Amino acid sequence: MPATMPKPRTAPPPPIPTHQQLALNQARQDKRARTAFNLDIFQTELIRCAADWMIGARQVGKAYKTADNNYRETLEKKKASDALENPDLLFGPDDRDVGRAWLDERRCLQAA
């Protein structure tokens, strides 16, 4: 065995980039920065549009709910108004109605 160990080889230093390589690298970095900036603008605009759509949907939903509530109130008022116009529905049968039914029944039996 040799008394001294051989020195490990070290990697050679990287080559010095040329002007063209430096220019290409700079263009690539500029393009990456512009793309990131444009993506950020796009995402912000997309989030804004989504928020606008959500607000619009909520307003349409509220309008439908208000219209439905108004329609139900109108039906209730109409039902109450109809009941006041026809007192027989409001108060139900009374003694006169029972008497009329009895007379009608007697007439039908006599006619037969």
Image (cartoon, rainbow, N blue to C red):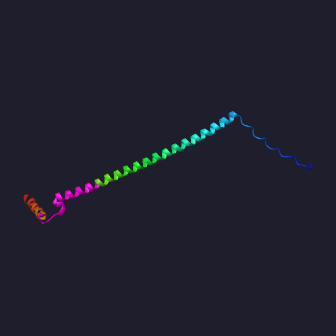
Residue 103 located left or right of residue 45: left
Query: In the image, what residue occupies the spot 18% across and 59% down?
Result: 84
Q: Position of residue 85 (x, y in %)?
A: 17, 57
Q: What residue span does the magenta drawing correspond to?
A: 71-96
Q: What percent of the width, then of the height, locates residue 19?
A: 69, 34
The answer to whether 106 appears left or right of 47 in the picture is left
In the rendered structure, the answer to whether residue 101 lies left or right of residue 39 reads: left
Based on the picture, tell me whether residue 79 belongs to the magenta stretch. Answer: yes
Give the x, y percent position of residue 1: 92, 49
Q: Nearer the viewer, residue 61 or 86?
A: 61
Q: Quadrant of the C terminus?
A: bottom left
Give the image quarter of residue 36. Answer: top right
- The vertical placement of 64 against 103, above or below, is above
Q: How many discs appear?
A: 0
Q: Residue furthest front?
A: 19
Query: Which residue does the image show at 18% across and 62% down from the upper left?
Result: 90
28 and 107: which is toward the camera = 28
| Residue 3: % across, % down | 92, 50
Residue sitting farthest toward the left: 110
Residue at position x 29%, y 54% in the image? 70
Q: Is residue 38 in the magenta section?
A: no
